Image (cartoon, helix red, strand yellow):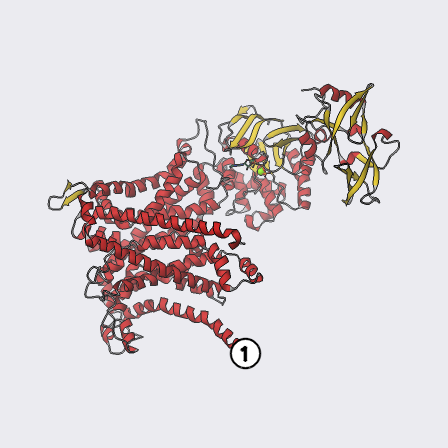
Amino acid sequence: MKENYRFLVEKSQEATVPWHEKHFKFLLVFPSVMLFILLTAYPLVHLIYTSLHRFDFIGGQFHFIGLANFSRLLGDERFINSIINTLRFMLMATFSQVLLGLGLAVLFNSMKFRGKMLLLPILILPMMIPSMVVNGIWRIMYSYEFGIINRILEGIGFTRIGWLWDPAIAMESVVLVDIWQFTPFVFLVLFAGLQAIPEEVYEAAKLDGSTKLQTFKNMTLPLLKHHLLLVILLRTVDTSNLFDKVLVLTGGGPGFTTETISLFIYRQSFVFLNLGYGAAASIVMLLLVILAGGSLFAILILGARVIKSTFGRQSYA
Amino acid sequence: MKVKLENLAKKFGEVIAVDNLSLDVREKEFLILLGSSGCGKTTALRCIAGLETPDEGKIYIGNKLVNGLPPGKRDVAMVFQSYALYPHMTVFDNLAYPLKVRRSQKDEIKRRVKGTAELLEIENLLGRKPSQLSGGQAQRVALGRAIIREPRVFLMDEPLASLDAKLRAYMRAELKKLQKDLGVTTIYVTHDQVEAMTMGDRVAVMSQGKLMQVGSSEELYNYPRNLFVAGFIGSPSMNFIDVIFETRSDKFFLRGKDFQIELPRRLGEMALNNAKDFKVLLGIRPEHMVIGNHKGHYTEDTSIKAEIYVVEPLGRDVLVNLRLGDLTLRVLTPPPFGAKMGDNIQLSLNTAKIHMFDRKTEQSLLVTKQA
Amino acid sequence: MHKVLLGKTRKADKLVPYLILAMVLLFTLFPLYWMIITSFKTPLEFVARDIAWIPTPITLGHYGEVVEEGFMRFFVNTIIIAVFSTILAVTAGALAAYSLTRFRFRAKFDKLFLLWAIIVRIIPPIVFLTPLFITFRELGLDDVRLRLILSYQVYVLPLCVWLLLGFFRDVPIEFEEAAQVDGASRIFTLRTVVFPLIAPGLVAAAIFSIITTWNEFIYALIFARVSADFTIPVGIATLIGEYEVLWGALSAAGFLSSLPILIFTVYVQKHLLRSFAKRGVLRG
Ligand SMILES: Nc1ncnc2c1ncn2[C@@H]1O[C@H](COP(=O)(O)OP(=O)(O)OP(=O)(O)O)[C@@H](O)[C@H]1O
Ligand SMILES: [Mg+2]
């Protein structure tokens, strides 16, 4: 918090102050703290407990088996495969969304025409509608025989493509859906960031005779740093959860080519009822995500610092 | 209602905002807290209001110790520098807020809002939102919100700071009259000397959290107790010259590098009583020196040779910067002023208006030991 | 000669952004268009030799199917769950965010709380699924709606806290201090001064929360075992079989369930942009 930030006074020795005034600050955080404990902290303890057990669903009993679930996981090729798939998806989706979103935001910000702002809600439509609806639309469009995409391809002389069947491109098809759905999100955040940059910055740059590319590199990018950082982090974190798309588009297939960690855990826990095994996988996933998120954050922050200290403040001037 | 501070102290981490501050504010008095930016005026005021908990010291309002009493129970009203008018309420609702808090009757609220609005001549603004008010109007509403409660003490934090110069001058007089009419003890924070000198019954000068001197405007101007007050009060500020204090054959002299001044006997004796060292600081205000040898007014002995450096016409006066060896002195003189840069002139001091300070303690040497 | 050429490229240059924007719009809108017209097509048109760009004749049959599938019930479930989780999250989040911005806490409680909120935002939701399931059973919470309202706090509570934190920080503390000096109690100040001032923040938090909970799938999938408890996303998922997809019903249900959100979006886009400029803490 800021150094000069002010707080409200609380100390008061007078006995006439009612107790709810005295403990006001605790009363206010109490509901949230309780919700967090009940819904996150306590379940995490449960998760650890479950991961050390084998669930016998005939008797409904947990049997302690130590770290056996974890050692089994390390040798489970299907689990390793799901980690690799998830990483592939995260990289492809985040990279293309940030690139496209940034391009679109810069383009849109530089354009001036009447009614521009009315286009904004249209451009962000895909991120607003339910994920499951998005999946439904694309499942229909990807359909091999009668899907509109293949029919258009045929119409212009190509052969049909097994978008969701072909192991070579099934994951890319899923990525495309995610691009359609969430590039608008990246665009919106970055566009809001661009809007916050005062016009004078660009005018000053123009007067200094810097080219468009220079302006982008020296002004726009540094000033947009925080927004970029934010979307990269959010998209990385969110793409790591990939579940509903693969569940209804590919079912994790063909084979296991699109099975993600989330899907793996879902199947272990709720289809095969290997609660202990699923919990162990959850813990591994949790550690991976926090590790990945933390190191990404560190890399981005440190990277930005290094750049700043190398190039000094000139990039802002 | 009296307000009394005893050894008040408040730190923010390493920063000492208020340092051992003791102050008596008299019944119905208009007391000004004056000091440069960051000297702890606001912090002191906020301690009195109860918005800040002091680290040490006692605060009395009336005869009651109010440390530990929440702000709402101290029966003080505060005018914030930013006015803090609730932006989502109309002027009427802003004025009525303190009464609503006290669960006053609807009719009673209406009556008092109307009365206050009349007093401040803002009846026609009652339906507006704060964003639709000019600076001066917003300022009046803020005042109104303080007045309407009929509190025991007013606390005001630079209420005129954001007004333009003309309006500020007008409001100074208004506010002073209002305070006298209402007869409510008022503590008023400002860093503006003119405000302090014209409005207050007494002025308390603060520096770095410490109280430097309390007194009427005349006292502060004529008898500054220390170097800080001497330099702070008065504009342009006082000149200071390193001199040696001497007594020779029953006479008192201040000897500088290339001049010597004989002190009036009264001042000399006082200084002799207080001085611990013969090296002292001579203080003289720009308005207490005259350029040229004014016979009959100042004596021959007090004249000093100096060279004109920069001349700044200020309108009513001319501010002349003089070179005296490696010293620069500022002198106020009436226009027209013919001399140019580089001219050599004679400078006369009004010796009755001389101040003397101990170089180490920075305390004035011209005080009679009194309570 | 050169000048003319230069002029021409300049003109073309100016057109390029519009061309790109048009393509983006086409890419964005086409799937939505396709969903809407598919919902009005007869099954024959799905497989007709020529692509049916505009449905002729228009049929409302698929909407009937949707109703038959029990979507009215899913709608009610979803609305109840979205509204109550939003009320809970915005209230609890606003109170906590206010307390954290305005009061000092010992032992870095405030920083730990906020850090925990971020960690929860980062943890994949599926991780909480099994243990939440067990926790609810332990507590004897059987009602599916209640279970979902509570579990959705995992998504929306951190979001509300962080979003509102920014709004509270932007409100000068003087307003509250003025009220305090005037003798207002803490609760009265909160009600009459603070909350009215951050109303835009509350609206923004509510919008994000409603959208998130309206669209949520995975918790609803696990907690709703019988169709009476389904939410819209789960209902839609049942229309997407592994081998067979009910195109018409799926499109109709998709269109219907997007409609409230679409209208909502157009209506509140001003708020959206503003809060994104502040802090874009949205779970995608
Ligand atoms: N909440 C706070 N946290 C940390 N330091 C503070 C806080 N409030 C004031 N200070 C510090 O205490 C000192 C005195 O501040 P204060 O606001 O009382 O000065 P002031 O005399 O009112 O100045 P100004 O004329 O600029 O308003 C300053 O150095 C200031 O930075
Ligand atoms: Mg101040």
In the rendered image, which quarter is residue B313 located in? top right
Q: Residues within 10 Å of mark 1 (few under 14, many from 20)?
A: few
Asked if residue B7 lies left or right of residue A103, the reply is: right
Q: Is residue C70 visible?
A: no
Quarter for ligand 2? top right
Q: Quadrant of residue B120?
A: top right
Q: Residue furthest left?
A: A58
Going by the numbered disc 1, the residue's amino acid type is: His
Q: Is residue C125 left or right of residue C90?
A: left
Camera-side residue of C131 and C91: C131
Question: Which quadrant, please, contains the C terminus of chain A?
Answer: bottom right
Q: Secondary structure at mark 1?
A: helix
The residue most toward the bottom is: C1
Residue B163 in picture, x, y percent from top left: 63, 45
C17 w.r.t. C77: above or below: below
Note whether C191 is above or below B54 in the view shown: below
x, y percentage for residue C254? 29, 63
Look at 58% across and 43% down and name the residue there: B141
Is residue C2 positioned above or below B320 on the image? below
Badge 1 is on which residue?
C2
Q: Chain of mark 1?
A: C
* C184 on left or right of B307: left
Using the image as rendered, state which of residue B327 and residue A5 is in the foreground. Answer: B327
Q: Residue furthest right?
A: B295
In the rendered image, residue B265, in percent from the top left (x then y), is placed at 80, 22
Quick one: quadrant of the N terminus of chain A?
A: top left
- Residue C174 location in percent, x, y? 52, 40
